[in-house]
Image (tube, grey):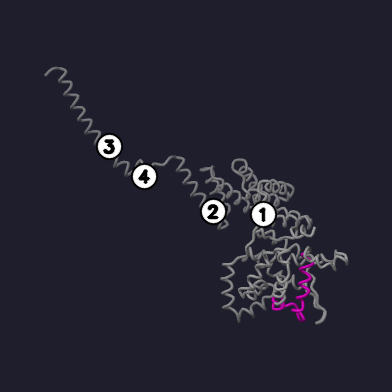
Amino acid sequence: MGLNNLKMNQFENLKMKYKKLFRIIVVVSLFTIADSPFTSFAQDVKTAGEIDAANAAKNYQHGIELMKKENYKGAIEALNDAVDLDSSRANYQFQLSLAHYYSKNFETTIKVLKNLLRKFPADVRYYDLMAESYMELRNDKKAENVLQEGIKKYPNSGSLFSQLGKIEYGHKNLNTAIMYWERGIAAEPTFPSNYYFASQAYGATSEKMWAIIYGEIFVNLETNTERTYEILNRLFDDYKQAVFIKSPRNKYALFTDERTHLSEKEFKDTMLFHKNFAMAYNNIAQRCVTEFKDKVTTEAIIKFRTKFITLWYSRNFPLDFPNPIFDYQRQVISENYFDCYNYWLFSKGNAKAFNDWLELNKKKYDQFLKWFLSHPLEMDKTNFINRTKIAAKLN
């Protein structure tokens, strides 16, 4: 055997040994990998970024749960961890700003929100919460600037106009506050808060007509909150303050004093009724006031409102002054639920009357509630109503 052949045989023997050794190493490695708590097969391997994102999501969910339990300190810690692990999620930072807001850390809330606006696309919620924080810090000027900036980006946001109205109302600028709330109604007709504030504001004036219209729209949009119950209570009082019963023969309705601003000649011009919503409303109301006997009761208000809608739709007023809440009342009447609807509407203002009626009408009321939930008031930019829109028609 030559030297070359010997070397070849040795090489082959070594190769065979290494092959066997490699197979052993691979088998051992597989078992080692499978048993290790720190590793996984290739298809389960996660990058560091993926691990951070997963842990961030867990911290985020934990923070949300803590916030629901009003543990804001714990929520801030969890949400801070989430942001540290994954800073690409805008909502992590927004929820962090909320946790700071609920903890009354208003300056930190503003700082987090400013960072959001620098790094992420704008969101109407950022402007809303930042303005609220400035208002809490008694810095209404900065709050107003934030809201005006937000409205430039979100002209259809009812909430931003609502906030501006609150600022003006706080400074006793009633007309300006109402102007903003009514602009908010036009911008986003289904946003409840502008109706709520406008109804409250008008309720403190002689314009009970608008207090009632805005209040009734509000409770149809927001049906089961503390604010709902507040307005349900006020609606009954609004009627009591608008209907005057001096004697069985001397009764009158005064839901608005707008008509007093007209000359005698204008007042006699019946064509003005088709231009002036307030005149038309009060004129029809005066024709219905006979439904009241010696005092304002829920039953009498229901009769008054039923007759009002009947007379309103017997004229051209629905064409002159489209009004979604009147249309809705007419729909409820056609379904034979108007008594149920009105007893609900005045349930807080006259609780005894409601409870006495409910004892005898529980089955029908339950049927109404099912219908009511499945037939909400429908409103959009084509059929909303506000005082500004009506005034434009008169002008």
State which tag comes first along the sequence, 3 or 2. 3
Q: Secondary structure at mark 3?
A: helix
Give the magenta part as a residue range.
277-302
Distance from disc 3 to disc 1, alpha carbons, whole Å, reads: 65 Å
Residue annotated with mark 1: 159
Q: Amino acid at mark 1?
A: Ser
Where is 107 relative to 188, above or below?
above
Mark 3 lies on residue: 26
Q: Which of these two is toward me, 39 or 127?
A: 127
Q: Residue 37 got which mark? A: 4
Q: Amino acid at mark 4?
A: Pro
Q: Amino acid at mark 3?
A: Val
Mark 3 residue crowding within 10 angstroms, few (<14) / some (14–19) / many (20+): few
Residue in the foreground of this view, choosing between 328 and 138: 328
Is 351 rendered above or below residue 95?
below
Q: Position of residue 72 (x, y in %)?
A: 58, 53
Residue 2 coordinates in the image, percent (x, y):
13, 17
Looking at the image, which is closer to me, 308 or 226?
308
Tag 2: amino acid? Ile
The disc, 1 or 2, on the residue closer to the chain's N-terminal end is: 2
Indicate left or right for 332 with 268 as reference: left
* Above or below for 160 versus 328: above
Instruction: Look at the numbered disc 2 and give the secondary structure of its residue.
Output: helix
Q: Which residue is mark 2?
A: 64
Q: Quadrant of residue 355?
A: bottom right
Instruction: Give the mark nearest the N terminus, 3 or 4.
Output: 3
Q: Residue at x 67, y 54 (%)?
A: 159
